[in-house]
Amino acid sequence: MDQHASHPAIVKRLKRAEGHLRSVIAMIEGGRPCLDLAQQLHAVEAAVGNAKRELIHDHIEHCLEGGEHARDDLREIKQLAKYL
């Protein structure tokens, strides 16, 4: 597997989001108000989105080679852009 220097930090972020999501599930099961649930789900969504963005930015900065691979790199950036 291709491990990047940023991956441990991204895993840490995702584990926090995972714990937060579990607490939101418990909130739903506990009958908490919808406004509270929406707010907490928004926070989980933002945490996952930030982890995704960090992963993609790290990949762009450290994995794309340029030079003779520029055309392939551009194609990959276009593919990655749809996930931002």
Image (cartoon, rainbow, N blue to C red):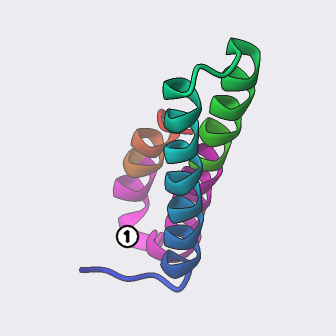
Image coordinates of residue 3 in percent, x first then y, are 37, 83
Reply yes or no: does residue 46 show up in magenta. Answer: no
Image coordinates of residue 38 in percent, x first then y, are 68, 21
Q: Residue at x 75, y 24 (%)?
A: 36
Question: Residue extending furthest top?
Answer: 34
* Count of numbered badges drawn on the protein: 1
Left or right of 47? Residue 81 is left
Closer to the camera in the image, 70 or 56:
56
According to the picture, the residue beneath numbered tag 1 turns out to be 68
Query: Is 66 located above or below residue 83 in the figure?
Result: below
Hey, what amino acid is under mark 1? Glu
Q: Residue at x 60, y 36 (%)?
A: 45
Q: Residue at x 49, y 66 (%)?
A: 59
Which segment did they paint magenta?
49-74
Question: Residue extending furthest left?
Answer: 1
Reply yes or no: does residue 57 show up in magenta. Answer: yes
Q: Residue at x 59, y 61 (%)?
A: 16
Left or right of 74? Residue 53 is right
Mark 1 Cα shell of 10 Å, populated few (<14), some (14-19), many (≥20)? few
